[in-house]
Amino acid sequence: RFEGDLHWVPLVNATWWQIQIDSVGTGSSDSDNTLSTATSTATSRTLEDTQEPTDIYAIVDSGTSLITGPTPDVTALMTEWGAESNFAGQYFLPCIQAHTLSLVFTIDGIEYALQGRDLTIASGELCLILIMGMDIESTIGQVDWILGDAFMRKFYVVHDYEGERIGMAPVVKRL
């Protein structure tokens, strides 16, 4: 169940439920803390990228537990958050800091904001951050981010195969 109306986003590629993302950042669109951002004609992939801007694409995938993104973007994000990584590329921070986390995906002009409780799992005093760097090489085209279960816990997602679109809305909050 979801709140409000579904916002329908056209698929770029129906094979992998691929959509285009306007921007990815920490905080609202009014914030300067943007990892990836859209311009009127193109999207820059990272803060550090000096190449020509390119579009940002994501797969909305219930078969992926985490949110994954380009390694440089995720590394910059984790540095900003003060997170530490382990040998497997997982990131942790003290749970007392988890409430400060914020990640916003702007998709088709709509902000989908995730907060610390949406982005972490507690394990004692440390919290595992449900975001991992992954550089995806694909035969279907560019894939920058995977919006997995960590995203879909907060946002109800409808995969409309015939309409070649994905509908999204906030999930109904449970008590």
Image: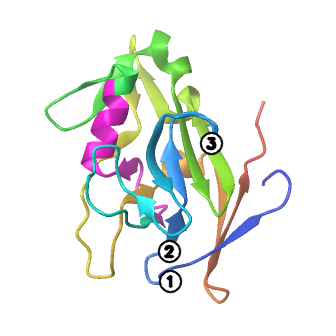
Query: Considering the image in quadrants, where does the N terminus appear?
Result: bottom right
Counting from the top left corner in percent of width and height, residue 105 is at 56, 49
What's the residue at 19%, 28% (across, down)?
86
> Mark 3: which amino acid?
Ser
- The quarter holding residue 10 reads bottom right
Chain part drawn in magenta: 59-79
Q: Residue furthest left?
A: 87
- The quarter holding residue 53 reads bottom left
> Mark 1: which amino acid?
Ala
> Mark 2: which amino acid?
Trp
Secondary structure beneath dot 2 equals: loop
Q: Is residue 61 magenta?
A: yes
Query: Considering the image in quadrants, where does the C terminus appear?
Result: top right
Crowd tier of the residue under label 2, counting other residues whose Cα lies within 10 Å: few below 14, some 14–19, many 20 or above = some
Q: Is residue 148 magenta?
A: no
- The quarter holding residue 165 reads bottom right
Residue with the mark numbered 1: 14
- In this view, 86 is above or below 149: above
What's the residue at 56%, 65% (across, down)?
40
Real-space CA distance between mark 1 and mark 3, rounded to the nearest whole angstrom: 28 Å
Answer whether labels 3 and 2 touch (C-beta < 8 Å): no
Answer whether labels 1 and 3 touch (C-beta < 8 Å): no
Counting from the top left corner in percent of width and height, residue 142 is at 33, 72
Residue with the mark numbered 3: 29
3 vs 2, front mark: 3
